Amino acid sequence: MGEVHWRELKREVVDSGLCTGCAACVMACPRDVLGYTEDFFPVQVGEGMAHDQCVIGDKGCDICTRACPRFRDWESDLDTELFGRQRTAEEPYGIARSILLIRTTDEAIAKVGQDGGLVSTLLVWGLETGRIDGALTSQIVTDRGPFDAAPTVVTDRQGVLATAGSRYTYSANPLAMADAEAAGLKNLALVGMSCQASINGSLPAYNVNKYKRKVALTIGLLCSKTFTYEGQQQVLADHGIDIAEVVKINIKGRYQVWTRDGSYHEIPLKPFHAYTRPGCKLCPDFAAQHADISTGGIGADDNWTLTLVRTGRGEEWIQGLLDEGLIEARPGQSDQVAMNLLTKLSTVSRKRWPGGALPDTAARPGLLPVVP
């Protein structure tokens, strides 16, 4: 990638608005001179250094730029690394070996999981068979509210079930790598939104070997955007709902809410748009195109998970679940609602990518529009 480091990353990705806040750069920084702000952006915290300065980078360290899945030629480089080719214009949701609809056969997981319960089933199976010894995911921050999320590490079935379900506030799950390292964990699954799942490609593409060896599976969550916690709290209050009484949230063209008293509410998505997290506004990747397995509940049936199996190791994990009867699967194309939404939402997201993030960098290949 050449002699580039934090200065270029700050200017071309963070300052330009292309930064999704995935925290890959913070996770990978070998000298811990990058921190993470409360509004989900990396920041220079090295003593005696300016906000765009890194004396370690001046000496030759470029790991932060190599870990970043949005720096310069990110899409073409990551496609080539993972799939041996670049996606075509007919693949707005990225390259996939197969597209399936999946649901778990585990009743306990089905009860607490989201949609078909695939993610929890993968994690439990991986932990119980020794394929992984931990998973980087998110947990509820109980001292703030029922749907404010934070990165965490889970290491057993109980931990997986306790963190199951969807949250629509942002959690930079790669930051949980620090806790995983402190616990001596060596083989990890990463569960993350599209932006975070892209590090599945950037780590091997740019030889960030330490973490490439640790991440045994990456599960990407289909994601159009996330909202601030305070914004969701406000919109719910405007509709007469106390967020403290909410037990479950889902988004399927509308904001669906279940409360402790057993009632169900629907709110249009429009009021939430004003509270979109800034890092989501230019993100072009709805479909987690560089994960091993991409999942989301966008079908006609709420009890199935639309699943894009993208890599060889992703295929091995899905086949393992099938062989042991832990999931049921059918072709994704059997649900035309899901397939149409996958194509539509992926195409819409791609249109967010700007033609030039900065006036004098419009000609950089990595800052050209992503082909729809």
Image: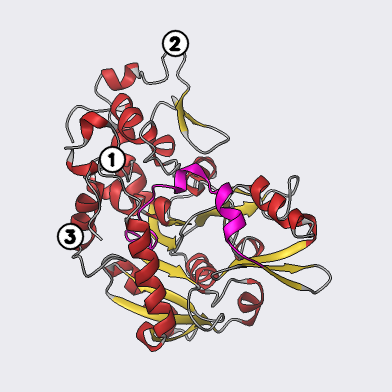
- Residue placed under numbered mark 1 in the picture: 71
Q: Secondary structure at mark 3?
A: loop
- Residue placed under numbered mark 2 in the picture: 48
Marks 1/2: CA–CA distance: 26 Å
Looking at the picture, which amino acid does disc 3 mark? Gln
Q: Secondary structure at mark 1?
A: loop
**Residue 75, image x and y in percent?**
25, 52
* Nearer-N-terminus badge (1/2): 2
Looking at the picture, which amino acid does disc 2 mark? Gly
**Magenta span main SS:** loop
Q: Residues within 10 Å of mark 3 (few under 14, many from 20)?
A: some
Seen at 16% across and 61% down, the residue is: 84
Front residue of this view, candidates 72 and 48: 72
Q: Residues within 10 Å of mark 1 (few under 14, many from 20)?
A: many
Choose top left, top right, bottom left or bottom right for residue 261.
bottom right
- Residue placed under numbered mark 3 in the picture: 86
Residue 170 in view (yes/no): no
Q: Residues within 10 Å of mark 2 (few under 14, many from 20)?
A: few
Marks 2/3: CA–CA distance: 42 Å
**Residue 355, image x and y in percent?**
25, 44
